[in-house]
Amino acid sequence: MGGTLLAAEAGRPPGAGLTGVIAVLTGVLLFIGSIYMLLWAVLGRRRAYLVLMVSLSGWMILLSAIWVFGAPGTRPGEGATGTPPHWEVFLTGDPRASRFSGLLSAFPSSPWVEAGPKMGPVETSREVEAFLAVAKEKAAEALSERGKRVSPDALRAGPVRFAEAGRDILAAAEVAPPGGGTPLRVYGLWNPGSLLLPSWIALGASVLIFLSHLWLLARDEVREEEQARRVAAGAA
């Protein structure tokens, strides 16, 4: 995944980021600025701003709620997303291995089990291929550091086993280089990620903006009514 992202960034044409910023600013000016100008002509500068922000934040509440909770035909997490769930792979000498030294030394015996049962939020049967992909990349990287360059696809991996350590879910497999050699034992720590965090932030921010501007709009209307009553009382 990381290599794909780097390749995509490397192939991005120069100035693509600036072009995107200009496109967003142009869209804001055209689609939001034009509505603001129309409201200003009817309601005045202050009231136009408040009405626009209440309407825009209300729309953002609906949109971000769909991102978080989903809707018919739309799954949660289809909008602004953060880090997806993934495996953090490491080898025996990694500092993370010291946290689970007793459990790792027991591999492949109990409590390590083959894929099949669900462990916490992890569907182990669905995660075998995902773990093997990153495990082979990690093993190829380690072999490259030892002066033996090999493609991850050329590596042979043994059965993947899973274990629980409190709230943590671990996976492990032995990955062997082609043509024989000492296999590398690769471990993985399940990271649930924060896929919906940006959507929750957008929803919370939209609610705060909506409520604050709705309150300001109500105050503005009360102030206008009081001014109208004072003018009417003075005229009488």
Image: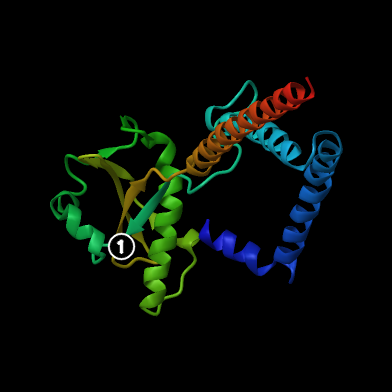
Q: Looking at this view, is 18 or 118 the one in front?
A: 18
Residue 46 visible to an observer of this rendering: yes
Observer-nearest residue: 43 or 18?
43
Q: How is the image coloured?
A: rainbow
Decide: is 170 above or below 88.
Answer: above
Crowd tier of the residue under label 1, counting other residues whose Cα lies within 10 Å: few below 14, some 14–19, many 20 or above:
many
Taking depth in this image into account, of 183 and 233 the one nearest to the observer is 233
Q: Mark 1 belongs to which amino acid? A: Leu
| 150 displayed left or right of 158 | right
Nearer to me, 45 or 169: 45
Is residue 31 toward the left or the right of residue 106 in the image? right
Would you say 88 lies left or right of 45 here? Answer: left
Q: Which residue is mark 1?
A: 184
Where does residue 62 sit, x and y in percent of width and height? 62, 28
Image coordinates of residue 140 in percent, x first then y, are 42, 66
* Image quadrant in which you'd find residue 73: top right
Q: Is residue 178 visible?
A: no
Q: Residue furthest bottom?
A: 147
In the picture, which quadrant includes the C terminus?
top right
**Percent position (x, y) of residue 78?**
60, 36
Compared to residue 74, the image places residue 11 above or below, namely below
Q: Secondary structure beneath disc 1?
A: strand
Q: Position of residue 206 (x, y in %)?
A: 57, 37
Residue ID at (30%, 38%): 114
